[in-house]
Image: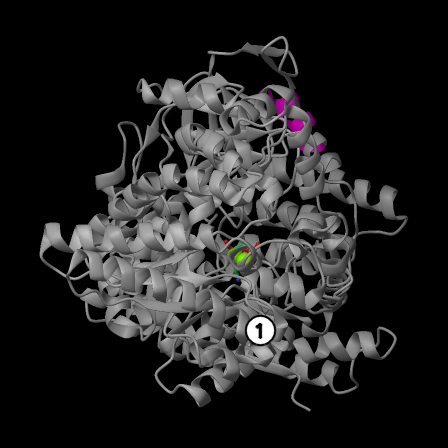
């Protein structure tokens, strides 16, 4: 077996595609050498050695030793030095490198090969004794701490002692003799700590370092990191051994790290830091202040590499261009300059912010380096979230008082208010307010809507507050246990901070942080690069993207974000408004049909206005309106005062109402009297809603002169007959309204598919449906027999034990729920070939689920307004 691959040493055996075998670092070193960039020669011991090592009781493969010797000889030949040669010593670095860069792995050891003899040879051959002894002490320090496990601080203390003795503060003030003294003390230290002298044999040093790299693959830090990031232990790490080049040989030497473009903004400008006369990690170690690359970015007093080492800088600019052309992506590179000559030590695709990723992808496509498809493919859809919401001004001062769950992204500031009603009235006066609750319930929804942000002290990422806030695009920090809310005293306490109602706070829903006072925020921009990306995505996707929206505000947001209609308008959300809930309660509690009819009559104009407003905003785009769905008890009066006012409205006795109230209680409301079961038992409710829809459609079509085609959706159908009956009622109302208005009106009637039985009998149901919309939230609940509101208690354990790969309410369960969807698609379209199909649940905004919808052949996905751009991008990626 081939266990060792040379790079840059006469032979170049690796390349970028061999990443799995050579690790990221090794594969890219070979790739760079292969395209003619100046890479110090070396070799990579493959990840397979690591795996073999652990499979065989920590023993190396037999051929390894010979292969390493051979590769090392090739390096010696390439640079004209000898490993352990006292006159012309070859020094090497030993570097770990897994497939993906992994903190927790062994730190790099530099200058390996130095000992008491070779250090003299290095001093003579370089003509610089200080450099030689500085390198030796660096080596003992690194090898001592990294390989031999001697505490880092011991080494630091010795340097401090020497500096004190010589009365100086800077490393640069220490001369050859000072470093020689440091080396003596270091060797004593190592001998004391490890009960053995510092290893003098370069070959022993090399195998010690190689063993430490492989050993570090299984250290606790690396294990933890792998577990958190789903990296299998079987991948293994590679080891890179590479000839040293020296950035610490004098003023014409340097070392640095940089990005080929600005990783925070994406600007096409060279970005990075370097240090003159320095080695390895000095740049990031913070001992000396690194300097900027380009003169344009240098502040007064700074010395740019462009000014100090102009030749090497020019070479580096050329390398930057070569690398970008070759890799066709922004690179993160490490380099060293030895006596004005540039060497490349690493390249990899650079980490970047969401904003930078966007700009880089767009500009690289515009520069002709990548295609539009590639640009689209490079943006992680969920990362757009960061670009769609206001963010904290990075320059603004802030005081964090607590931290909860980042439940709904964006930043918002406002005055503390503890009740939904007060939030609403203050918001109507134009005030910026934050709703602060221990937890929220459906009755708080109007307040959540009016607030800039929501803070709760209880509940998780799928708590009511979190789900509703995300849906609205409202900033939310949930489950902030460090905050205590006292409704009576109207105070919010976080540690030593006691804030009163009316005091300002700021929330960052992307991080979960809570700040005292007002922190300035920056508005997102939807033009420029963002608009360009969306345009490309739109031309590549097949599925349409609609939004779930019921308020005019949400509908407008949805259109701004490019929604192509409303896929789900939840009419019950319209029932909670303060001026309506009283009437809704009368309708539910009514003892007679006449009393119910009276209440419904009062609700009709409200509903008609609601729908008209949506139709106007959506201007001819399809609008799917779901008739009343939730269990009645959600609307029931809670307090005696509420009950009394309903009694008065209905002219009934309080006792009679109490009885009815009790009769309406259910033990399993989500599986109880809801959805079309309401429409079947109280046909007049659906009739009123249908009337409001059709009257509004005719009204708006008349205003605008262009047709409105409402899509009426019946929820929770499980049997074809349910749809047949409710549809008949809707058709009857339509006929009546149309006849009365004397105009034409097209409309559609369809159903949610959200019960397993509906999916399994979709052919029969399709006979009565113009469209299906998969309600995957309920379909997930009913398929798993699992209540979303109660899953929090055990879901984390299920994910951890890998019973479920992910939260099935976030990403669709393809095997179970997905199979039902596929059955319904096949049966539905089998019966009715043109049947329109969409998804409306939370999954409609989840990229992995959107990929499933594409495969299943759905016509559209519908998601909350703020996720529309994410869905547009994900739908494009799914179609590519
Ligand atoms: P990390 O993965 O932590 O970045 P590296 O293996 O890249 O570790 O090594 C860290 C630094 O050590 C490099 O950026 C470079 O400055 C220095 N280094 C590594 N190998 C060499 C070498 N052959 N010659 C000079 N410096 C080197
Ligand atoms: Mg590195
Ligand atoms: Mg449902």
Q: Where residue 184 appears, x then y in whole percent?
A: 74, 41
The residue range painted magenta reads 158-169
Q: Is residue 270 above or below residue 233?
A: above
Q: Going by the picture, which residue comes out furthest to the left?
A: 705
Task: In this rendered view, identify the residue nearer to me: 614 or 46.
Answer: 614
Q: Is residue 261 visible?
A: no
Q: Is residue 129 above or below residue 489?
A: below
- Look at the magenta stretch and give its main secondary structure: helix
Residue at (34% x, 72% y) in the render = 543
Tell me how the rendering is colored.
one colour
Tell me the quadrant of the picture where the C terminus can be found: bottom left
Task: In this rendered view, identify the residue nearer to me: 771 or 489.
Answer: 771
Q: Which residue is mark 1?
A: 719
Residue at (15% x, 60% y) in the render = 742
Residue at (40% x, 85% y) in the render = 832
Is residue 164 rendered magenta in the image? yes
Q: Is residue 78 left or right of residue 806?
A: left
Task: In this rendered view, identify the residue nearer to me: 62 or 689.
Answer: 689
Q: Residues within 10 Å of mark 1 (few under 14, many from 20)?
A: some
Q: Where residue 179 appears, x then y in whole percent?
A: 62, 39
Task: Describe the element under mark 1 as helix, strand or loop.
Answer: loop
Q: Is residue 615 visible?
A: yes
Tell me the quadrant of the picture where the N terminus can be found: bottom right
């Amino acid at each position: 077996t081939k266990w060792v691959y040379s790079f840059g040493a006469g032979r170049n055996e690796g390349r970028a595609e061999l990443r799995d075998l050579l690790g990221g670092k090794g594969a890219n070193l070979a790739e760079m050498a292969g395209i003619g960039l100046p890479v110090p020669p070396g070799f990579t011991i493959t990840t397979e050695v690591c795996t073999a090592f652990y499979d065989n009781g920590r023993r190396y493969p037999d051929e390894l030793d010979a292969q390493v010797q051979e590769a090392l000889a090739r390096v010696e030949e390439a640079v004209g030095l000898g490993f352990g040669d006292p006159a012309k010593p070859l020094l090497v670095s030993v570097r770990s490198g897994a497939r993906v860069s992994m903190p927790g792995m062994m730190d790099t050891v530099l200058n390996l090969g130095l000992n008491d003899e070779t250090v003299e040879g290095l001093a003579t051959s370089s003509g610089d004794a200080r450099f030689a002894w500085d390198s030796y002490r660096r080596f003992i320090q690194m090898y001592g701490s990294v390989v031999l496990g001697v505490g880092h601080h011991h080494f630091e203390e010795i340097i401090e002692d020497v500096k004190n003795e010589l009365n100086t503060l800077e490393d640069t003030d220490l001369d050859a003799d000072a470093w020689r003294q440091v080396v003596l003390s270091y060797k004593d230290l190592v001998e004391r700590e490890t009960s053995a002298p510092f290893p003098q044999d370069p070959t022993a040093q090399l195998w010690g370092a190689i063993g430490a790299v492989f050993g570090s693959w299984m250290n606790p830090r690396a294990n933890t990191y792998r577990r958190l990031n789903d990296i299998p232990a079987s991948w293994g790490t590679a080891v890179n051994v590479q000839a040293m080049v020296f950035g610490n040989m004098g003023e014409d030497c340097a070392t640095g790290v940089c990005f080929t473009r600005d990783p925070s903004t994406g600007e096409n400008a060279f970005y990075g830091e370097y240090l003159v006369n320095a080695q390895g990690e000095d740049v990031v170690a913070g001992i000396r202040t690194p300097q900027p690359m380009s003169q344009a970015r240098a502040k007064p007093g700074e010395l740019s590499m462009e000014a100090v080492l102009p030749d090497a800088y020019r070479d580096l600019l050329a390398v930057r261009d070569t690398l970008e052309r070759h890799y066709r992506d922004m690179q993160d590179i490490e380099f060293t300059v030895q006596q004005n000559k540039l060497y490349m030590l690493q390249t990899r695709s650079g980490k970047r912010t969401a904003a930078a990723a966007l700009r880089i992808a767009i500009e690289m496509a515009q520069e002709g380096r990548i295609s539009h498809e590639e640009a689209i493919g490079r943006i992680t859809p969920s990362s757009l979230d960061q670009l769609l919401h206001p963010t904290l001004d990075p320059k603004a001062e802030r005081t964090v008082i607590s931290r909860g769950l980042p439940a709904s992204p964006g930043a918002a500031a406002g005055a503390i208010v503890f009740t939904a009603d007060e939030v609403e009235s203050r918001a109507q006066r134009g005030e910026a307010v934050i709703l602060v609750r221990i937890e929220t319930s459906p009755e708080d929804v109007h307040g959540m809507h009016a607030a800039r942000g929501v803070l709760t002290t209880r509940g998780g990422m799928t708590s009511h507050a979190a789900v509703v806030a995300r849906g609205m695009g409202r900033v939310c920090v949930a489950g902030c246990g460090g905050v205590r809310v006292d409704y009576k005293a109207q105070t919010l306490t976080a540690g030593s901070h006691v804030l009163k109602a009316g005091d300002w706070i700021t929330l960052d829903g992307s991080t979960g942080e809570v700040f005292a006072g007002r922190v300035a925020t920056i508005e997102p921009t939807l033009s420029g690069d963002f608009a360009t990306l969306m345009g490309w995505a739109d031309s590549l996707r097949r599925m349409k993207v609609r939004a779930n929206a019921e308020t005019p505000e949400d509908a407008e947001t949805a259109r701004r974000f490019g929604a192509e209609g409303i896929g789900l308008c939840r009419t019950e959300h319209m029932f909670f408004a303060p001026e309506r809930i009283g009437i809704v309660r009368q309708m539910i509690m009514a003892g007679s049909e006449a009393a119910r009819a009276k209440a419904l009559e009062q609700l009709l104009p409200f509903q008609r206005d609601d729908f008209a407003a949506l139709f106007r905003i959506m201007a001819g785009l399809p609008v799917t309106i779901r008739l009343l769905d939730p269990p009645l008890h959600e609307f029931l009066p809670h307090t005696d005062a509420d009950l009394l006012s309903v009694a008065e409205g209905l002219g009934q006795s309080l006792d009679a109402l109490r009885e009815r109230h009790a009769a309406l209680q259910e033990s399993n409301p989500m599986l109880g009297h809801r959805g079309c079961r309401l429409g079947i038992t109280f046909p007049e409710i659906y009739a009123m809603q249908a009337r409001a829809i059709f009257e509004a459609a005719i009204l708006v079509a008349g205003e605008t002169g262009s047709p409105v085609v409402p899509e009426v959706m019946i929820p929770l159908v499980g049997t074809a007959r349910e749809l047949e009956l409710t549809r008949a009622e809707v058709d009857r109302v339509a006929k009546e309204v149309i006849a009365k208005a004397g105009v034409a009106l097209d409309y559609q009637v369809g159903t949610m598919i959200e019960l397993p039985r509906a999916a399994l009998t979709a052919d029969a149901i399709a006979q009565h449906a113009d469209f299906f919309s998969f309600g995957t939230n309920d379909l997930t609940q009913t398929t798993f027999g699992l209540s979303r509101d109660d899953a929090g208690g055990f879901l984390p354990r299920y994910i951890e034990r890998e019973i479920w790969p992910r939260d099935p309410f976030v990403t669709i369960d393809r095997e179970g729920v997905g199979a039902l969807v596929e059955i319904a698609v096949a049966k539905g379209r089998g019966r009715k070939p043109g049947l329109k199909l969409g998804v409306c649940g939370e999954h409609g905004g989840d990229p992995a689920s959107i990929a499933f919808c594409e495969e299943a052949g759905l016509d559209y996905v519908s998601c909350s307004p703020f996720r529309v751009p994410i869905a547009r991008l994900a739908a494009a990626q799914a179609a590519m």
